[in-house]
Amino acid sequence: MVTILAIESSCDDTSAAVLREEYLLSNVMASQEVHKKYGGVVPELASRAHQQNILPVVSQALEQAGVSVKELDAIAFTRGPGLLGSLLVGTSFAKGLAIAIDKPLIEVNHLQGHILSHFIRIEGREHREPKFPFLSLLVSGGHTQIVKVNDYLDFEILGHTIDDAVGEAFDKCAKLLGLGYPGGPIIDRLAKEGNASAFRFAKPNIAGLDYSFSGIKTSLLYFLRDNIDENPAFLEENKKDICASYQKDLIDILLKKLILASKQTGIKEIALGGGVSANSYLRERVTFEGEKRGWNVFLPEFRFTTDNAAMIGIAGLYRYRKGLFAPIDVAPISRAADYIQY
Ligand code: KG4
Ligand code: ZN
């Protein structure tokens, strides 16, 4: 029975988890409130907060799991993509611990973690997981991709965004509306009370399975500018309808390419992953489309949608089983495009 300690520090959440085989024993998270007043993640403050959080978070994860460091078989950590200074904290900590207990290090691609979160098991709970090959709609703050997952460690990117990620499109809208950060959950909540047919924004016209979200963001910007020019109270009077309409357009864009990918590949096993997969309207629409099209839909548990170490642990487990260990001089990789092993 393999016991893995996993560490995630790619952005603004410090997290540690312990897994025994596929079973999750603990998953501890420290979110960083410090960024809220800046309306976005400040990299320098993020690495400083990771440094403060990492030891208590790891200790708590081990304690909650009832596992001592001596019982660990390996240390998995997020190598990238993410903020370099943040990644460095997790990477250095993982290395130090691996050296101290003389156990192997496992590097994990953060995006693979999001995709594989469906394989995490909880003791005593019924488990459902996608069968290979499946399609993963990976939607986060930094990435938007449709990935064909052939096996635990065999991924093919079928489509990706050519500019902004969908999470950014949510966050930027929230910023324009003066709603705070991160914007996705706030828009999700306000949209529930708004009319999604009130307004329409420019939809991209991109070939194949790729996405684009910069046009719709600009369209929202001009829409607000023009309407506020005419009526300074426009934003206040229409906030909920704007959120509902903009959210509907974003989800329409996501769904259109996902449906096309399923048609082109004939794959009906559909899984969501990443922070935006917490969006209630996206979950509703994918479930609805799934019923209509005979898909087997897999929605991640809420706590596994945004960044967490449990998903790094499960991805690490599959690398452990193949003996894919990282050298001790392994360095973080900030940009997704530089990650050759995806
Ligand atoms: O996966 P994640 O935690 O970090 C990255 O790897 O990027 O994703 C964060 C993103 C943010 O853009 C946040 O606004 C978005 O996920 N998000 C949501 C919701 N919850 C988080 N977007 C829409 N609706 C939500 N409920
Ligand atoms: Zn993420």
Image: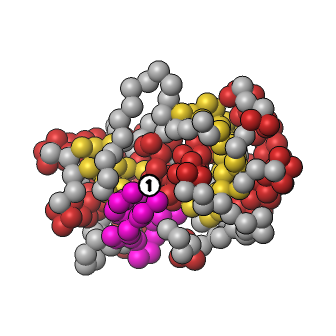
Is residue 260 in the magenta section? no
Crowd band around label 1 with a 10 angstrom C-alpha radius: few (<14), some (14–19), many (20+): some
Q: Name the residue located 18 percent from the left edge and 67 percent from the top edge.
A: 264
Residue flagged by tag 1: what amino acid is it? Tyr
- Seen from this angle, which residue lies furthest top? 124
Q: Which residue is mark 1?
A: 152
Task: Answer with the quarter of the image where residue 144 lies.
Answer: bottom left
Residue 335 in the image: x percent, y percent? Answer: 59, 73
Residue 197 in the image: x percent, y percent? Answer: 22, 51
In this rendered view, identify the residue nearer to me: 34 or 318.
318
Q: Name the secondary structure under disc 1.
A: loop
State which quarter of the image contains the N terminus: top right
Q: Is residue 163 left or right of residue 32?
A: left
Residue 27 in the image: x percent, y percent? Answer: 63, 36
Relative to 7, residue 325 above or below: below
- Cβ of mark 1 under 8 Å from ligand 2: the answer is no
Q: Name the residue located 50 percent from the left edge and 57 percent from the top edge.
A: 112
Q: Is residue 142 left or right of residue 334?
A: left
Q: Is residue 23 left or right of residue 157?
A: right
Can the viewer see residue 184 in this picture? no
Q: Name the residue located 62 percent from the left edge and 40 percent from the top edge.
A: 2
Residue 30 in the image: x percent, y percent? Answer: 70, 40
Is residue 155 in the magenta section? yes
What colouring does the structure picture have? secondary structure
In this rendered view, identify the residue nearer to me: 220 or 254.
254
- Span of residues in magenta: 138-166
Q: Name the residue located 52 percent from the left edge and 38 percent from the top edge.
A: 22
